[in-house]
Image (cartoon, grey):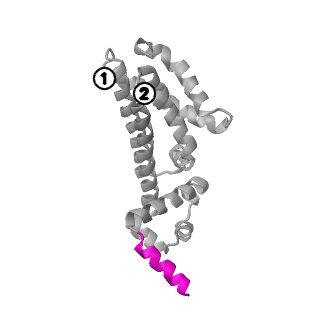
Amino acid sequence: METQQATAAGRKRLPRAERERQILAVAEHVFAADGYQGASMDDIAARVGLSKPMLYEYFGSKEGLLLACLQRSKRELLKATTVAAAGASTPAQLLHDCLLAFFKFGDEYAQAWALLRNESAVPNASVSSELEEIRTQQIEFTAGLLGTSRADLDPVQLEAFAEAIIGACERLALWRDRRPDITAEQATEHLLALFAPSLAQNL
């Protein structure tokens, strides 16, 4: 009894931001493993060590919890590609490193990637909108990077190229799910072979 009371007291003292990170980590795992429909708020609450009403107090609903997971994935994906871009010294390296960062994100954050790829399993407008915002974020980021190496391209061309690159990245990432023997490095080289000729002016 004393141990349970001490544990409960420790949980109450946990800062809210840290508690939210803990909940999101657990929820991400459950959503990835069971899907949105199969995920149980009771299960998530039990794994975190909270009551179900307390879990709802943090995120409002199961949909709200999923949206928070997706928003965290969006931040992590942008961070990964931004760090990769910052370390590149040439346009060719920039393209290579950002593509590689995308595929490595899928490997290192497998549960987050599972959420991002299974958008069709969640028939919900808010979730679909959040997933599209993640896609748009990466398209805008990619268009900005292309603009630094291809000053001859107008904004429409940059947007079109970025749409094509992100779309190809998503499809190749899904392909890798079926072909686990394909490494992040190999997937990057395949895309470079496809896109490098059309971007060759400054690559």
- The quadrant of the rendering that contains the N terminus is bottom right
Q: Quadrant of the C terminus?
A: top left
Residue nearer the viewer, 33 or 10? 10
Crowdedness of circle 2 by 10 Å Cα count: few (<14), some, many (20+)? Answer: some
Q: Is residue 10 magenta?
A: yes
Instruction: Give the x, y percent position of residue 135.
Output: 42, 38
The image position of residue 19, as x and y in percent, is: 44, 65
In this rendering, the answer to whether 115 lies above or below 192 is below
Q: Which residues are magenta?
A: 1-14
Which residue type does callout 1 highlight?
Answer: Pro
- Is 152 placed above or below 88 here? above
Please report the residue visible at 55 percent of the width from the left and 65 percent of the height from the top. Answer: 40
Circle number at residue 88 = 2
- How far from the left and from the top, in percent, is residue 90? 41, 21
**In the rendered image, is residue 93 in sight?**
yes
Disc 1: which residue: 155
What's the residue type where badge 2 is placed?
A: Ala
> Mark 2 and mark 1: span between their CA atoms?
23 Å
Residue placed at 36% from the left, 20% from the top?
A: 149
For the residue labelled by badge 2, is the local secondary structure a helix, a strand or a loop? loop
Estimate how packed mark 1 is, as few (under 14), some (14 to 19) or many (20 or more) residues with alpha carbons within 10 Å. Answer: few
Per the image, label 1 sits on a secondary structure element best described as helix
Residue in the foreground of this view, choosing between 93 and 187:
93
* Residue at screen point 47% across, 59% down: 24
Tell me if residue 60 can be seen.
no
Label disc, if present, on residue 176 of the rendered structure: none
